Image: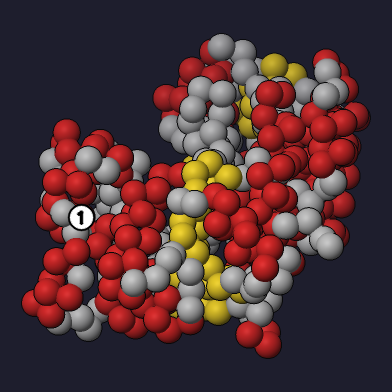
Amino acid sequence: MSQNVYDTLVERGFIEQATNADEIREMLGKERVTFYIGFDATADSLTAGHFLTIMAMMHMQKAGHRPIALLGGGTTMVGDPSGKSDMRKVMTKETIAHNAECFYNQLSRFISFDNDGAIIENNADWLLNLNYVDFLRDVGAHFSVNKMLTAECYKQRMEKGLTFFEFNYMVMQSYDFLVLNRKHGCRLQMGGNDQWSNIIGGVELIRRKESKPAYGLTFKLLTTSEGIKMGKTMKGAVWLDPAKTSPYEFYQYWRNIEDAKVEECLGLLTFLPMDEVRRLGALEGAEINRAKEVLAYEITKIVHGEKEAEKAQEAAKELFARGGMSEDMPTTVYKKAELDEGKDLITLLVDTRLVPTRSEGRRLITQGGVTVNGEKVTAIDREFTSADLKDGALLIRKGKKAYHQVKIEG
């Protein structure tokens, strides 16, 4: 018999908390289980942060279970306070609907929705037209405010002021689980560790309303050694959409993660056998870079396909081995006439998004953190024109690992 997917998730490092671990494991070993994971549609692309939960969905579907990807068309109207110190910006229904459609298209690359293999739902379908008084009587009556206020997801917000608007979020997410349980027989909700309180709310609501068991399971959140969520760069989020984060930039992000996180990411974010994961994770010194290359390639292959992963890998090798340029490197193109007017280095750094602000660019240059075509530049007023192009481009490097090339047209 093939390995129980619960054991697979434990071995690969996914599981943080479970309501009834033994019961969940037994259920997953005996029958086809319908489970759900929610995605609030706060942007028009999923991020590297979502990728861990997508990998868990893929493991579950490969083991014969049925995922429900729940798009939060309704809950996004409120905003999850979990882990947030400020209230989320309110978005229009049209923007949320567009984002949800983008999520569906991206999820379809990882999860098969054919032949009842998975289900896509949008909680806007049942949340947006609820009768408020009926909802309070039917669902709200089962929630203790005293208990809700002890939930981890509200603690941070309590200090700054938790609005009644956001306070409803746990009740809404719990109701989602009840609806999916009634509609599709969904018995298991999975999500990031910051969702634990919300998941417990749904588990208890189903037990009270339907007098039958339901289960919850959370995954660890990907963080750096300092406890900061991974998947962020100076430019912002690492997106799964290649138009927002190029395959090359995506590859480079994982190629450059800290040594201590390599084995963990190989287990969570690739399908490599665990023996290989442990072998690569045990490498030390300069050898660990080989493990990082494997990690970056494998993740890029899953997200962007084998061809793009190979292109990104080749571009990275050209840069690190020969300091050369590559068509697959992030590139900014100016009109020749525009560059001939002269661009100071700070402007180039901001335009290429190597730095977020001019003051950050100034600091980086004066500290010796910028090279152009292999030469360190420390003068903040240094200007460049098309005459400075070498082999048709300016190769700007920030620090040791962030590269960008500037080219001209016309």
Assign the N terminus to one quadrant of the image. Answer: bottom right
Q: Amino acid at mark 1?
A: Glu
Nearer-the-camera pick, 238 or 126: 126
Question: Is 349 displayed left or right of 210 in the figure?
Answer: right
Residue 232 at x, y = what percent?
Answer: 53, 39
Query: Which residue ends up furthest to the left in the rendered image?
Result: 133
Label 1: how many residues lie within 10 Å, few (<14), some (14-19) or many (20+)? many
Residue 324 at x, y = what percent?
Answer: 86, 35
* Residue 227 to residue 325: above or below: above
Residue 384 at x, y = what percent?
Answer: 64, 31
- Residue at the spot 20% in from the left edge and 55% down from the top edge: 166
- Residue at the spot 78% in from the left edge and 56% down from the top edge: 3
Q: Indicate the quadrant where residue 79 lies.
A: bottom left
Which SS class for mark 1? helix
Question: Is 134 displayed left or right of 385 in the figure?
Answer: left
Assign the C terminus to one quadrant of the image. Answer: bottom right
| Residue 191 visible in the shown view | no
Q: Indicate the quadrant where residue 374 lies.
A: top right
* Residue 152 to residue 372: above or below: below
- Residue at the spot 49% in from the left edge and 44% down from the top edge: 17
Q: Indicate the quadrant where residue 96 lies.
A: bottom left
The residue to which callout 1 is attached is 166
